[in-house]
Image (cartoon, rainbow, N blue to C red):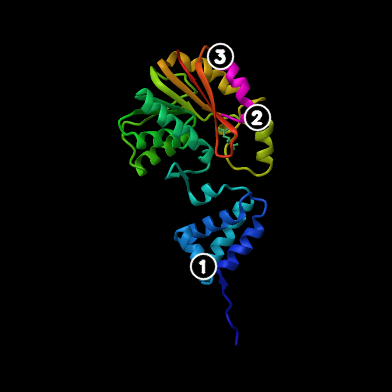
Amino acid sequence: MKVETFMTIREALMEASVQLENSGSPWLDATVLLSHICGQRRELILASFPDDLCDEHYQEFIKIIKLRREGHPVAYLTGKKEFFGRDFWVREGILCPRPDTEILVEEALSLIENRHYNRIHDLCTGSGCIALSLALEEPKLRVSASDISVHSEEVFYKNRETLQSPPQTEFIRTSLLETLKGPFDMIVSNPPYLTTDETVDRMKDGWKEPSLALDGGADGLDLIRIIIPEALPLLSQGGCLMIEAASSQMEKMKELMKKAEYTEIRILQDLAYRDRVIVGIKP
Ligand code: GLN
């Protein structure tokens, strides 16, 4: 008589994390993906180690682990990414929100409170994670967001609806600051800032996020060189520009900000203590 053997949740996770050893966070990825398939919270999956995994879920798990191995981000596979305590819907064609960007939101909220800012714009918004987090944390703010990508528009509006962000949070589809009408008290941005070489390397590794959201040109600063001077006339007096970039780019950005005559220029670090966000004030 043939005895059917089942795999336990623990065994399935162990097997998957070996297969994902090059993913950067194999165990986390495996548990997040399995909890997505089982429709259970991750804590529950972890508490159910000795239980059998049904064959249907196991087959689905094998398929999704294969996609992850090929480079699909976990967020694309589950359709969501947590950012600042909320689940944002993401899909191909959109940069997945990163925890590094949360410090920009935190700092923005503290400046908004201290300086009584009201009108805020998020440039290169992607999924809308910065704009919608600010609007949800401070519903009285007048927040807008822009991006050149049509995918961004779709994802932004869907997130606005799902997260029940204030309906006045509007999206403008435009290239950088082209059709924006100020004055804004604050402009925040997580623009594409990888170098072209870094972007090409990631694509070769099977990275699935769009180069439009990553590639900032030869030194990664092509868009930032436009944003810094062009944001200034759109800011109110005492208004603030805040940009995320890589730590190696901060000194150059500081120079660009000084040249454009921003004052009170500061650099903030991310959770891994890398310089990540630059802040400057319009005098
Ligand atoms: N910080 C991102 C990364 O290193 C890049 C995001 C961006 O270019 N805006 O993957």
- Pointer 3 with pointer 1, Cβ within 8 A: no
> Which callout, 2 or 1, points at the residue further toward the start of the chain?
1
**How crowded is the residue under tag 3: few (<14 C-alpha within 10 Å), some, or many (20+)?**
some
Depth check, mark 2 against mark 1: the one in front is 2
Q: Which residues are magenta?
A: 245-259
Tell me the quadrant of the picture where the C terminus can be found: top left
Q: Main secondary structure of the magenta part?
A: helix
Determine the residue positioned at 48% across, 37% down: 102
Q: Position of residue 139 (x, y in %)?
A: 31, 34
- Between 89 and 232, the one nearer to me in the picture: 232
Residue type marked 3? Lys
Mark 2 highlights which residue? 195
The answer, for residue 98, to whether it is visible in the render is no
Image-quadrant location for residue 162: top left
The answer to whether residue 116 is above or below residue 1 is above
- Pointer 3 with pointer 2, Cβ within 8 A: no
Mark 1 highlights which residue? 56
Query: Which type of secondary structure does the marked residue at label 3 adopt?
Result: helix
Residue type marked 1? Glu
The answer to whether residue 75 is above or below residue 278 is below
Q: Position of residue 157 (x, y in %)?
A: 39, 37
Image-quadrant location for residue 196: top right
Residue type marked 2? Thr
Query: Which type of secondary structure does the marked residue at label 1 adopt?
Result: helix
Query: Which type of secondary structure does the marked residue at label 2 adopt?
Result: loop
